[in-house]
Amino acid sequence: MEQLFTLDSLFTLFMLVLLQAVLGFDNLLYISLESKKAPADKQSFVRKMGVGLAIILRIVLLFVLMSLIQFFQDPFVSLHDNNIIEFEFNVHSIIVLIGGIFIIYTAVKEIWHMMLLKEHASADEKAAKKSTNTIILWIVIMNLVFSFDSILSAMALTSHMEYGSQLTLMSIAIIMGGVLMIVLADKVSTFLQKNRMYEVLGLFILFIVGIMLLSEGGHLAHLHLFGNAITPMSKTTFYFVIIVLVIVDIVQGRYQKKLLAQKAQQEKQND
């Protein structure tokens, strides 16, 4: 346990917390959007409870992964020598694929509701009646889906350490990252509520997150379609796309304001 008090271990802890923060961005966005389905006075509670329970389950998942890592990576069904589709599905790939499909479904459904105003209004009313426990459950489930990659990456960062020190350091990083997520979740949700125009941007980012998870799951399953291997979307590509989307949204918003101002000025002149 002396390894916990060295300069190297402190730097590793900093890198682990940073890893939790960077990889937790997409999770944070999902939490903020999902919590909106709860009544207004319960939304903050839903976010804190969801992330709090997820922290506990992440630590449990860490113990499970450390003990049964091979089980999650070993394929349990495979198909080869096929010109159309080849795969080697394992538990890890199935979890990531299901998470990607669910997130894409959620994003598309919300975007569709926004396009149809009447349906969107009725959907908001229905969502407000949705069980708080159900929303917390989905936040916890998706938090665990997102946590797989961060835990596996953390295991790689601490592979040079003894088992006890490795487990303790990663548990501390998970708790610190969870606390940071609880604090930021309220701030992100407040920002989205005050700037409703960014909700569409957030949903499209969530859609890209789903695609990233699908590509990652396909890669983990060694999926080949028509002889072409499915390759995972890199984090660099993901953040580049996000930056482009944000810039486009800002430019479009300012251009729209300029057009509205010109239209108002023309109407004033005509009067």
Image (cartoon, rainbow, N blue to C red):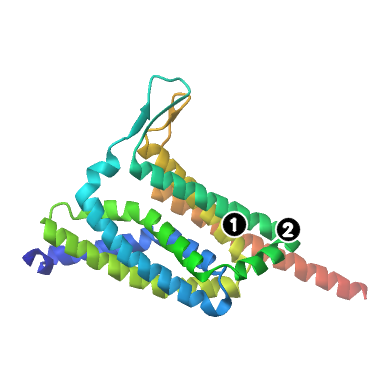
- Residue count near mark 2 (Cα–Cα under 10 Å), binned few <14, some 14–19, many ≥20: few
Measured from the top left, where is residue 187 in percent x and y? 47, 75
- Residue 232 visible here: no
Measured from the top left, where is residue 94 in percent x and y? 40, 43
Q: Is residue 101 above or below residue 123?
A: above
Instruction: Classify residue 249 as left or right of residue 91.
Output: right
Instruction: Classify residue 119 as left or right of residue 145.
Output: right
Q: Which residue is pictured at 52% across the width and 72% down the height? A: 189
Measured from the top left, where is residue 266 in percent x and y? 85, 70
Distance from disc 1 to disc 2, alpha carbons, whole Å, reads: 23 Å
Q: Residue furthest bottom?
A: 41
Mark 1 against mark 2, which lies toward the viewer? 2
Q: Quadrant of the N terminus?
A: bottom left
* Image quadrant assignment for residue 139: bottom left
Q: Which residue is pictured at 39% across the width and 68% down the height? A: 51
Which residue lies under the disc numbered 2? 116
Instruction: Classify residue 70 as left or right of residue 226.
Output: left
**What secondary structure is found at the residue carrying circle 2?**
loop
- Residue 192 visible here: yes
Instruction: Classify residue 126 as left or right of residue 247.
Output: right
Residue placed most toward the observer, 206 or 118? 118
* Image quadrant assignment for residue 93: top left
Q: Which residue is pictured at 48% across the width and 68% down the height? A: 133
Which residue lies under the disc numbered 1? 248
Amino acid at the residue labelled 1: Val
Residue placed most toward the observer, 65 or 189? 65
Point out the tag, 1 or 2, that comes first from the N-terminus: 2
